[in-house]
Image (spheres, rainbow, N blue to C red):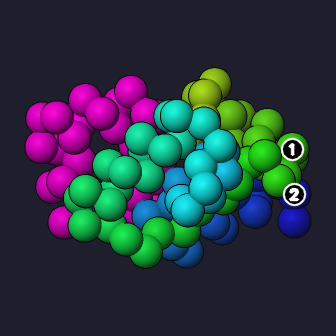
C-alpha cells in the first residue's frame, strides 16, 4: 500500500480521525492541543489519532490527501472537515457539536 492508500483506509475505517502533532495526551503544538480539547468538549473522548511527527511520509501525505497545507486535520465519516481554525469556527457556531453528535 502506498501512503495515500494508508491514509484513505484510516479515514474510512474510523469515524473520527485527527492527524496531529503528538498525541491527545501529549500534544506537541498549540493547534493540536486546541483540536483535541474541542473534540473532548464535543463529547468525543475516543477518537483515532495519527502523530504526524512520528511518520514523515504521513506528515507530507496528509497535506496532499486533502490538499490542505497545515496540521492538525480532522476527518469525520471519511470526509475532511478542516484544520484548527475551521474547527474553532465550527465549534463557536455549534456546528462541530452537531457534526460529532
| Res. 90 in view | yes
Residue topped by disc 2: 2
Residue lying farthest to the front in this orientation: 26
Label 2: few (<14), some or many (≥20) within 10 Å? few
Residue 99 position within the rendered picture, expressed as x and y whole percent measured from the top left: 23, 55
Tag 1 residue: 56
Residue 39: x percent and y percent?
34, 56
Gap between marks 1 and 2 measured at Cα: 14 Å
Q: Is residue 95 magenta?
A: yes
Helix or strand or loop: what does disc 2 sit on? loop
Q: Which of disc 2 and disc 1 is earlier in sequence?
A: 2
For this rendering, which residue is in front, 85 or 33?
33
The residue lying at 87 percent from left, 65 percent from top is 1
Residue 7 position by quadrant: bottom right
Q: What range is drawn magenta here?
A: 74-101
What residue is at 78 percent from the left and 46 percent from the top? 53
Label annotation for residue 70:
none
Is 56 drawn above or below residue 92 in the view shown? below
Quarter residue 3 falls in: bottom right
Amino acid at each position: 500500500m502506498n501512503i495515500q492508500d494508508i491514509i484513505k483506509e484510516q479515514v474510512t475505517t474510523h469515524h473520527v480521525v485527527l492527524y496531529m502533532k503528538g498525541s491527545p495526551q501529549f500534544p506537541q503544538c498549540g493547534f493540536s492541543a486546541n483540536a483535541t480539547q474541542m473534540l473532548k468538549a464535543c463529547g468525543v473522548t475516543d477518537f483515532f489519532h495519527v502523530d504526524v511527527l512520528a511518520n514523515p511520509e504521513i506528515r507530507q501525505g496528509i497535506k496532499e490527501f486533502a490538499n490542505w497545507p497545515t496540521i492538525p486535520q480532522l476527518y469525520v465519516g471519511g470526509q475532511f472537515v478542516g484544520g484548527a481554525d475551521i474547527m474553532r469556527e465550527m465549534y463557536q457556531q455549534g456546528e462541530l457539536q452537531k457534526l460529532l453528535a
